[in-house]
Image (tube, grey):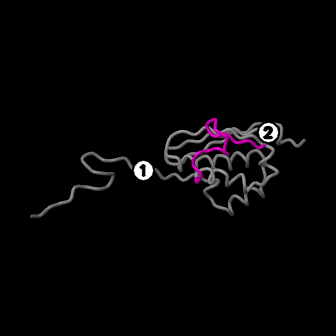
Amino acid sequence: MSKHQLRMVMASSKRKTAIARVTLKPGKGRVWINGTPLEVYPIEMARLKIMEPLLIAGDGIRNSVDIRVTVEGGGFMSQAEAVRTAIARALLLYTGSEELKQRFKEYGRALLASDPRQTEPEKWMRYSARRWRQKSYR
C-alpha cells in the first residue's frame, strides 16, 4: 500500500459567491455533493462539469478515493465550477503527481486556478452597477 493511500486531504475553491469544500480519503470511488451521489445529481450540465477532473485523472485514482463535497452560495453553474476546481486541487494534493498537474493544465487553467471575477454591487440611485438614468435634452 503506497503512502498516499493512508491519509485524508481537504481542499477548497471559490467561484463568484459559491464556496466548495472537498474532503478526499481512501475509498471505492464514490462522490457525494451535499449528501447527494454524483450519479443522481439533478442538473446534467453541472454534473458533467464536476466530472471533468475525475475523467482526466483516470480510473486508477478515481476508483481508489471517496470524495465528499460541501458547496454553498451562488448559482448551480458557479457551484459546479467551484466543485470541479476543488476536486482537482484535492486530487493533486492526494497524489502529489506532477504528471497529473500537467494534464490538468493542458485541459484548462480553470481546473487549478479560481476565477476571481465577481459581480459589481448596484449603486445608489441607479438601475444597475454602471447604468445611469438617460439624459433628456428636450
Q: Name the residue carrying label 1.
A: 119
Residue 54 shown left or right of residue 12 in the figure: right
Give the camera-side residue of 41 and 26: 41
Residue 133 shown left or right of residue 66 in the figure: left
Residue 96 shown left or right of residue 17 in the figure: right
- CA gap, disc 1 to disc 2? 38 Å
Range drawn in magenta: 29-45
Query: Callout 2: few (<14), some (14-19), or many (20+) C-alpha neighbours within 10 Å?
Result: few
Residue 95's x, y, as percent? 79, 48
What type is the residue that disc 1 sits on? Thr
Residue 67's x, y, as percent? 71, 41
38 drawn magenta: yes
Residue at image point 67% right, 62% down? 107
The vertical placement of 17 against 132, above or below, is: above
Residue 84's x, y, as percent? 63, 50
Give the camera-side residue of 126 and 98: 126
Q: How many marks?
A: 2
